[in-house]
């Protein structure tokens, strides 16, 4: 059971907009802590998609966006493409354990 | 361009210890944060701990406290993860990641624990 809760799966058709949620608590996502999002294709290195809730590293398309409100965060992917099919993870610092925690991951399927 | 290069796959016996490495290229290890994250088969990502050489600081996940040690050799830009008292459920891919936000990841080292 992960400290941060994500839906286990999500799906969409090419061109659609999909959102993935990440729910936490005051001592992680809430308060001063920020949320990062990662894309992971099996057998490859995970990739940072969003940091500090809504910032994109260079090279990440603007189809990917992040937001945070209270103790929850969301990743939105617009103009869905087949290559977006992957596992997506949120992560946040967790004050109570003085460490990072990840969500359980969401498997995105492009239909 | 920052690259993290892992040491090779390991097969270990239960109860033994493993030490794996992550060498950084294109960035100075001593000026950065270096974390270790693992993924067991069929499971999600799990943060194990981090080292911040320029602060002389380390943080470890409570899930591994007492069994994990992270060190950094700044002269060779190489970070190490040592995990002791291995169990079968430590079988996983172990990734190093550089940066406060895990900005850059290595390809991972597969560690298999089997009798």
Image (tube, rainbow, N blue to C red):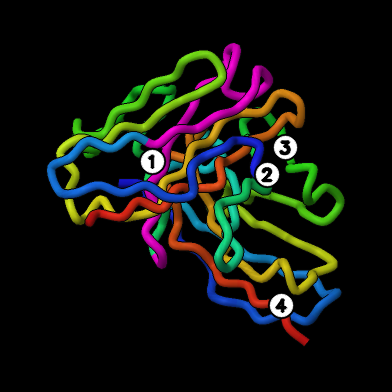
The magenta stretch is A20-43
Is A36 within the magenta?
yes
Q: How far separated are the C-alphas under marks 2 and 1?
A: 18 Å
Q: Secondary structure at mark 1?
A: strand
Quadrant hosting residue A97:
top right
Which residue is label 4 attached to? B113
Q: How far separated are the C-alphas under marks 3 and 1?
A: 21 Å
Is B14 within the magenta?
no
Chain containing the residue with disc 3: B
Chain containing the residue with disc 4: B
Which residue is label 2 attached to? B49
| Residue occupying image coordinates x 67% and y 48% | B48
Outermost residue to the bottom: B115
Residue B59's mark? 3
Q: Is residue B106 above or below residue A101?
A: below
Q: How far separated are the C-alphas under marks 3 and 2?
A: 5 Å
Q: How far separated are the C-alphas under marks 4 and 1?
A: 29 Å
Marks 3/2 in contact by CB < 8 Å: the verdict is yes
Of B110 and A16, the residue lying toward us: A16
């Amino acid at each position: 059971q992960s400290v941060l809760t994500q839906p286990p799966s999500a799906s969409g058709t090419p061109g659609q907009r999909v959102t993935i949620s990440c729910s936490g608590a005051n001592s992680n996502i809430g308060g001063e802590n920020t949320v990062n999002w990662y894309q992971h294709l099996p057998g490859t290195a995970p990739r940072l998609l969003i940091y500090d809730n809504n910032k994109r590293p260079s090279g990440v398309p603007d189809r990917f966006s992040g937001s945070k409100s209270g103790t929850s965060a969301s990743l939105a992917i617009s103009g869905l493409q087949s290559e977006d099919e992957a596992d997506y993870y949120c992560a946040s610092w967790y004050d109570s354990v003085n460490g990072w925690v990840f969500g359980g991951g969401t498997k995105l399927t492009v239909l | 361009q920052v690259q993290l290069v892992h040491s090779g796959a390991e097969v270990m016996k239960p109860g033994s210890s493993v030490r794996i490495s992550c060498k950084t290229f294109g960035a100075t290890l001593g000026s950065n944060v270096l974390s270790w994250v693992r993924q067991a088969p069929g499971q999600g990502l799990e943060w194990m701990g981090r080292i911040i050489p320029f602060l002389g600081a380390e943080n470890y996940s409570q899930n591994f406290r007492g069994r994990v040690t992270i060190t950094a050799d700044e002269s060779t830009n190489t970070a190490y993860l040592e995990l002791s008292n291995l169990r079968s459920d430590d079988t996983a891919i172990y990734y190093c990641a550089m940066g406060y936000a895990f900005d850059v990841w290595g390809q991972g080292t597969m560690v298999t624990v089997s009798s």
